[in-house]
Amino acid sequence: MPAPARRDRLVARLALAWLLATAVWYFLGTLWVRVTR
Amino acid sequence: MGPGYPLTALLAVGLAALLLVASAGWGYGLAGGLLARARAPRGLAPLVAVALGMGALSYAAFALALAGWLRPWALALVALAGVARAARRLPAEARAARRGWRRARGRRPALLAAPLARWAAALMLLALAGALVGAVLPEIEYDALWYHLGFPARYLAAGRFLPLPCEHIAPYPHQLELLYAYPLAAGLAPAAKLLHYALGLLAAVAAAWLAARHVGRRWALPAAALALLAPTYLWEMTTAYVELQLALACTLAAALVLEWRRTRRPALLGLAGLLLGLALATKHLAFLVLAPLAAYLLVAPAATAGAARPLRTRVADVVRLVLPALAVAAPWYARAWALTGNPLFPMFYGVLARLGVPMWRWDAAQDAAWNAVMRRFGDGRSWPVLLTLPWRMTWDDMRFAGSVGPAGLLFLPPAALLWRRLSGGVRLLALLTLAYVLVWASPFGSFQTRFLVPIVPVAAVVAAGGLAALGALLRALAWRRAWTLVQALVVLVLLVQVPPLVTFADWRLGWIPNVVHNVRPTPLLTALGLRPVDRYMRTWLESYPAARWIDAHVPATGRVVWFGEAAQYYMRQDAMMDYSECARPGVWRSAPGAEAEAWRRLRAAGVTHLAWDKTRTDLDPARFAIRSPVFLRDYAETVYEDRVIQVLRLR
């Protein structure tokens, strides 16, 4: 495992941001549909 | 069927297990030499043997059907020969497995070392139990009743292949359906469903093996869970459809090609080719795996860095994969050719017609209708739609007639972001997944989630590879809390896909509860014999009572135009769909006023009965001659009617 560089931090942040945004979209979206229907 | 249902279920489980043993016997018997030469890894070889053996059973039935000997006794002899072969081979295999198990003692705990792996194992067990309840019950799903079980049942009744001219599906390759002939011959249709269940389970095991090999042992169970808990994948395990045969064959073929990448043993490619041949003989979709794997063999670098790999070697390796695949599939494509003039029927009809290739049993109008059905799914192919496809298919399970859950959308893009940290094997699996999905989304594909099932196990390994790389990076950055959260998200995704909770998805658009029915109290109580099977059937297959009535009261030579939910398997009679080409002239092309013409056309097609579905909202009775008062008075009489189906006998 190479030592993490600045680029690695960026990649990690991007991956986490993707997971967070998609999870919020999917799970909260589903709950939202349930509540508003 | 009745209160003794648990006995039926147990017999079905026993028969399916026996057929798997017979498959292992045939697999080792026929491909043992190739397996030895390939020195396929110990975890992979039994899976390959069983997958090939299932194909051998199916092709034995194919030969019997050609010879007119597709009879229960003949199928029993074939199966027993496999069991006898297995009885000689399996003790040695079991001893070797025990030795391997003891040797691997130190490595074993790694499978369950991580909390994520333990969660994955627990949730998978719950899902497997739920799907098993669905699998042991009588069949209720559309395509299974229409042709996956319907066709082999009719071949069995006749003792041979039938051309089935009124079924446009009949010329398609259907090798797995001939494997289903074995349980049907024994009168145990649920065992056919259990064979499909077993295929799904084995494909998940293959995904676990791939993940252990190319990602790390602790990722074996999460990868298997990501595959198995994809809702449409799990649903397929409860029914006698066919996509899980492709899932197993394609995952094993990918695993074998990755082994070849390391060892360059040609026999590995031969085995992969045989497996892909069986997949091609099940469904055309397998070309979407064969083509990328063949392309990889063409461009793969030499085994030692810097060495040249001449074109001749490259082509020879492609041939080693493609030739056995095409040879194994050839009988089915030859059959399609003989029946229609188009070996790839019904694909490429337009191209072949323009080239002047003589074809029959199909025309431009039918081709247009078929294409319209294939295009009915998804939201079209405009650029904005294609760019948002991953979100659309994750969200709108109704439009895509199925769901692979949110795991793909969540966990595949991080694998792309972390590309440089993935192992070479995982990268190749990622490219294979990408190639498959791109063709699926192209105008050659159809936006049915079910058609993605064959690549789900491979995609699950890629997702596991991406997660493993992310975990390693986060640990290296000492962002421990972030990694805990990511793992919690994986568990949450798996959790909401376990059957009782998967109805969570219905909160959106509602495909899943229509099909993942098998964990509600009624199915469980039915499987346990505490509720009558008849009641279960009436609840989940509304056309079932009418099908049973026709089976009992209409002469076996009768021919029915069927408007209801598919239930053909429960009738001996020839029941063609209302959209069959044989029924169209009298049904769809005869408007009110042309009652006499409609009657003549139906009679000319040999039709004796009509089974009208009163609940269908897509049919306007006012456009059909057969629903006009004149027709109902002068040309037909009602002989049966329930809440859903009205059966009319033509005068």
Image (cartoon, coloured by chain):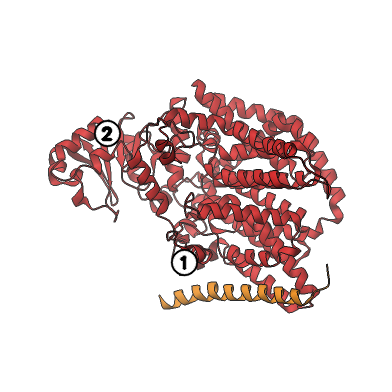
Q: Residues within 10 Å of mark 2 (few under 14, many from 20)?
A: many
Describe the element under mark 1 as helix, strand or loop: helix
Residue B252 visible to the viewer: no
Quadrant occupied by the C terminus of chain B: top left
- Closer to the chain start, of discs 2 and 1, is 1
Q: Colour of chain B?
A: red
Is B503 placed above or below A18 here? Answer: above
Q: Residues within 10 Å of mark 1 (few under 14, many from 20)?
A: few
Mark 2: which amino acid? Val
- The residue nearer to you, when weighing B290 against B395, is B290
Task: Give how far apart the Cα atoms at labels 2 and 1 are.
Answer: 47 Å
Judge if badges 2 and 1 mark residues of a common chain.
yes
Mark in front: 2 vs 1? 1
User: Residue at point 55% right, 33% down?
Assistant: B182
Picture coordinates of residue B572 (x, y %)?
38, 33
Picture coordinates of residue B619 (x, y %)?
27, 52
For residue B607, the mark is 2
**Chain appearing in orange on the rendered image:** A
Residue B431 visible to the viewer: yes
Res B553 quadrant in image: top left
Check the residue under mark 1 and report the chain it is in. B
Q: Which residue is mark 1?
A: B384
User: Residue at point 81% right, 55% down?
Assistant: B108
- The residue nearer to you, when weighing B613 against B391, is B391
Picture coordinates of residue B617 (x, y %)?
29, 56
Mark 1: which amino acid? Pro
User: Residue at point 51% right, 68% down?
Assistant: B504
